[in-house]
Image: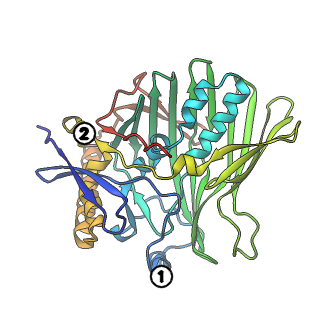
Amino acid sequence: MRRRSAPVQVEEEEEAAAAVAAATDEGLTAVLTPPLALDGDRPPNVVQRVFSLFRNVRPGSDLTHFQLPPLFNMPKSQLQLYGEGVYCIGEDYLSKCAKAKSSLERFTSVVAWSISTTRPAIFGLAPFNPILGETHHVSKGTLNVLLEQVAHHPPVSALHATDQEENIQMVWCHNPVPKFHGTSVEAVIHGKRQLRLLSFGENYEMNSPNLLIRILPTPAAEWAGTVRISCKDSGLEAEMCFHRSHSFLGFGGNSRAVKGKIFHSKSLKTIYEIDGLWDRTVSLKDVHSGKFSVLYDAEEAISKLKAPIVKDRESLLLTESAVVWGEVSQAILNKDWERAFQAKRSIEERERKKQRERKSMGEVWIPKHFSLSHTKEGQWECWPLKQAVPPAPIVVPPQDKRI
């Protein structure tokens, strides 16, 4: 019989404004922490700790199976980070996509929404690697979001989100492949994101920027690479390069610069130029008229975001990320590193035992909410098994109205 949980409010010591929502009962803990802040701090002595961590790792090594001690973990799973990019948002850029009148206006709205899913990374801290079958289910208004870890070796995460009121559907498939390059770690995010505006019969496909963790010459965690967005139904495309602005020998500059364009697929004629900082504002320039407009405002989109809360404690699944890692997260928040280490090791050992048992019995694990396939090009693809995502037991509280 599944154990049930009851909501409890917890407050993180170092961040009085960062409320931690938790559901606990008979040792079962569900911890939900605030989304990543617009300006995240890095932990003290982090450079020395990172050097010690990678001392025996060779350049070019695949870090997919690398296990971090809890001291280097943030109190949440990678599934939660993926989900936060969709459901934790101040200004509702997603609704703008569905309400825009022309195909060009909808496309620019999708570009702005795509930028809004980019959140600041924290150097020296990483989320938990999701266990096989782990899920994360959250609702914000009429938007319902469901994620599942559909593979573990290699790690593949799937996302399905639907908003039946706005007639929107999202399907994502993410396969991060991190590699150590001596003075940096680069996580290449394979897989594609699809956003469907069903009222207009438009399907938008896009990829993700890569996460680059620099150790030298200056420690930093930044997004890099080219994001491409295409809509075959409207014949429009966009290219955006996430990069560090001008710097001298790696010093200075801004690591959150983005530059690109929106253009016609057939003629390759540029319609708009994109330029700015994704953690501040990104502007749109009409190349025909020369007029500028604000495409994206990070202050409106990803500042003062609230942590999700448990609304229906009886419907929480044992596979829910906030439950799976609840004890570890609570120990990290309390800085009880020994307890965090033991709790994390217990989870990892249990998963290894399950894997050995499946292997000995010749069983193949099958995802519960998605189908999964491996293409000839070496990419993973995911499809949801159900047409719509149901309302979740975890919800995002409404944002305070700005004065």
Q: Secondary structure at mark 1?
A: helix
Say which quadrant the N terminus sits in.
top left
Q: Earlier in the sequence, mark 1 or mark 2?
A: 1
Q: Is residue 390 visible?
A: yes
Q: 401 or 69: nearer the eye?
A: 401
Q: Residue at x 45, y 46 (%)?
A: 84
The residue that disc 1 covers is: 48
Res 196 → quadrant:
top right
Q: Residue at x 75, y 30 (%)?
A: 236
Identity, as a three-letter code, of the amino acid under mark 1: Gln
Image position of 200 (left or right of 134): right
Image position of 351 (left or right of 91): left
The residue that disc 2 covers is: 317
Res. 115 mark: none
Q: Residue at x 32, y 33 (%)?
A: 392
Q: Is residue 356 visible?
A: no
Res 5 → quadrant:
top left
Question: Callout 2: 10 Å neighbours few (<14), some, many (20+)?
Answer: some
Q: Secondary structure at mark 2?
A: loop
